[in-house]
Image (cartoon, grey):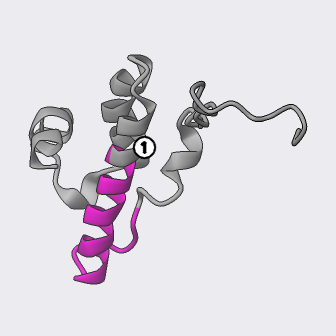
Amino acid sequence: MIRYLEQVFFPAFGPVSVEDIEPSHILDAIRPIEGKGKLNTSHRLTNLASQILGYTAITGRIKYNVALGLKRALTLKIVRFMDVNPLFKVDPLYS
């Protein structure tokens, strides 16, 4: 996860202090990853930002977690279920 912070969030936020981070800053950092089709990664990064900002809110550094609810602004993940194993054949009498 530290790699994501170093590659995605740190360059996007630059010298902005944690008190000045807005939801748009977080989305601007995550949108390029979402645009590449890496939906699972973009959701994980949103969760990571929410955890970090939640900690800073609990410790009194910020008033509230601005990352809460950002998952609703992202593209939904597509859940695919695995097909039945083609080697396993169901007897027609049982179907």
Look at 34% across and 25% down and name the residue there: 33
- Whether residue 31 is situated above or below residue 77 in the rendered picture: above
Q: Nearer the viewer, residue 73 or 15?
A: 73
For mark 1, give the secondary structure: helix
In this view, 69 is above or below 53? above
49 horizontally vs 88: left or right: left
Q: Which residues are magenta?
A: 45-65
Task: Assess whether residue 77 is covered by the magenta stretch.
Answer: no
Q: Nearer the viewer, residue 57 or 3?
A: 3
Which residue position holds label 1? 43
Question: In the image, residue 7 lies at what x, y percent?
Answer: 13, 33
Q: Amino acid at mark 1?
A: His
Q: Residue at x 57, y 27 (%)?
A: 87
Q: Residue at x 42, y 47 (%)?
A: 23
Position of residue 71 relative to residue 79, above or below, is below
Judge from the rendering whether residue 17 lies leftward or rightward of residue 20; answer left or right: left
Picture coordinates of residue 85 (x, y %)? 58, 31
Indicate the quadrant where residue 37 lies: top left
